[in-house]
Image (cartoon, grey):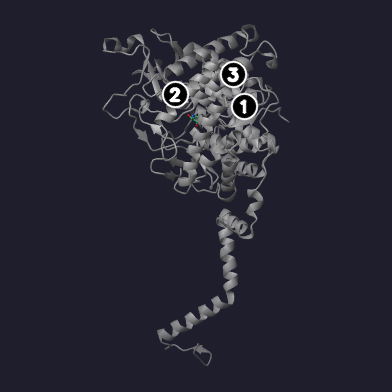
Amino acid sequence: MAKQKGKIKRNDDYASKERNLVSLASDFLYRHIWSLLILCLAVCAYFQPHIFSGFIRDWIGFSDHWDTAPLPESPQFLAPHARLEADTTKQQAVVQAFKHAWLAYERDAMGADEYHPISHEGTNLTEAGGIGYTVVDSLDTMLIMGLYDEYHRARRWVNQKLTFDVNGNFSTFETTIRILGGLLSAYELTAQDPLLLEKAIDLADRILPVFETTSGLPLPIVNLAERKGYHTTDFPGLVSVAEVGTLQLEFKYLSEITRNPAYEKKVKQIMEVVDKAKLPHGMASIFMNIEDGEYIPSSVSLGSRADSYYEYLLKQYIQTNFSEPIYRDMYLDAMSSVQTHLFRKTQSGGLTYTSELQPEADETGVLSWRLVPKQDHLACFLPGSLMLGAVSANPTVPRNKISYPPKEEQLSADGLRDWKIGHELLKTCLATHETVTGLSPEIAHFRIASDGMDEMPNAPPDWYIRGAAEDALPSYNARYMLRPETIESLFIAYRLTGDNRFRDHGWNIFQAIEKHCRVDSGGYTTIISVAEIPTRREDKMETFFLSETLKYLYLLFSDDRTIPLDRYVFNTEAHPLPIFKPSR
Ligand code: DMJ
């Protein structure tokens, strides 16, 4: 730099100044290039640790260590003796269906949250990326079906690609039942693969902040990178009873295996709030206020937004080896109440169905309840749950002495009532499969005297699909989206009775799925109306088709050594978790 007697020369021309600056900068860069590179890597490691660690592991070949974690020599989930024999031909047909679905997803969309088999595309649940919903939801089904090659590839993806450091909003409930439940179940079935536990802990820790509310009820949305809970935009301030009451099996099992009570504490606190908020009729309205932990006037239903709350009352009692009678009492109270208030019979065929109570306010604001004869397909988990409750909640003999099927005297009065109604409801769920496709709709309406339909030509005697008119776009009620609930109930009914008729029904449903939902190039889709042929399709394969529908079908045809019901309890996404005696 030009200097004159220690002073900077004022009339330097700009060009020469620029040249000097450039040469200074390049000199600096040259001398500090390595420091800068290291600084960049450190910043990258800080903000995107998974990319950094994945790169390092791949580079030095360390990832192989995790990628080849061995499976136990023989499956952990087999009981020593079988009473019911497998139907291996039908089981293998179900395995082929699983492969048809999984291999298409793997080919077109590996790692994406959701799969669209017609367009051969995958999508994620947030713009920031996904968290492998389909992969993680499928892991334990592969293990149970013995699809170890597929399992190893899926696990490798979990090892190398799955990160929860995603700056996007996810449903607290769905992420818990599908991802946390999927990881924990696969952890159990692989005899404690540490990779899966590490992922489960990371996820649960990111979810924990949703419980930091005044009542302790969880916020329904979680941003996993921010580790922060949010309200939904549709129902700010509210959370559904299914969303609060269907986290318990997963968080309690995680506490048990980590010996860290933090997870269990949060979900037990929820149950205390729900118990305290109890409504006079003993049932749950679908919405609760997150601030004060009270119910707000909203429908009472056994379907959407409520279903798995009832399911988990019973299953919480089963999960800790019948050591927490509070949940049995809450379950039995709720079941007595729903039978009085929600169960009705059709006049023509005498079909027992579940209806909904909807609140209505008059001009003065006084509230009354209207009974709506509407049953979601989702409510078809209940027949199986009632049968399981009959033999588990309060039998008159030790549980291991109950016959197959149970004898009347082995069940309590409540148990016998639930056993019988469970069968009746299952018959109704099967009746809703009596459509041209053999598939049941998302929502069925039942005939009541005041519906005015008698005047209509060809009025259906018992039930119908509202809005399934031909030539119009059918209503949402008419679709079948590969749901598992009827099959789930058939599986439990078969395991508790050994009655082959339940298998026959399951096989018919499976064939209907094959006929109407299977996409030739791979995958299965939702169909828009179960009441029309040829069917129209929606380009979506729900993740629960792999985790639940096909798993329950496979188990329906397996012997009863496989995932025995006295050792495992299924979470609401069909991920089996072990029954344990709490170590605390
Ligand atoms: C699943 O995600 C779970 O079973 C949930 O509880 C509600 N139903 C869907 C499948 O239908």
Q: Which residue is mark 2?
A: 377
- Single out the residue that lies furthest toward the bottom: 5
Q: Is residue 313 left or right of residue 582?
A: left
At a point 68% along the width and 37% down the height, the residue shown is 191
At a point 58% along the width and 9% down the height, the residue shown is 416
Q: Is residue 534 left or right of residue 385?
A: left
Question: What is the x, y in percent for residue 294?
Answer: 51, 26
Look at the numbered discs 1 and 3 and tell me whether their residues touch, using CB distance below 8 Å.
no
Element under disc 2: helix
What amino acid does circle 2 point to? Answer: His
Q: Residues within 10 Å of mark 2 (few under 14, many from 20)?
A: many
Q: Which mark is residue 191?
A: none
C-alpha distance separating marks 1 and 2: 22 Å
Badge 3 or badge 2: first in the primary sequence: 2
Question: What is the x, y in percent for residue 300?
Answer: 46, 20
C-alpha distance separating marks 1 and 3: 10 Å
Asked if the beta carbon under badge 2 is closer than 8 A to the nearest atom of ligand 1, the reply is yes
Question: What is the x, y in percent for residue 153?
Answer: 57, 46
Look at the numbered discs 1 and 2 and tell me whether their residues touch, using CB distance below 8 Å.
no
Q: Which mark is residue 569?
A: 1
Q: Which residue is mark 3?
A: 388
Q: Residues within 10 Å of mark 1 (few under 14, many from 20)?
A: many
Badge 1 or badge 2: first in the primary sequence: 2
What amino acid does circle 3 point to? Answer: Leu
Quarter of the image with the C terminus is top right
Q: Is residue 280 above or below residue 111?
A: above
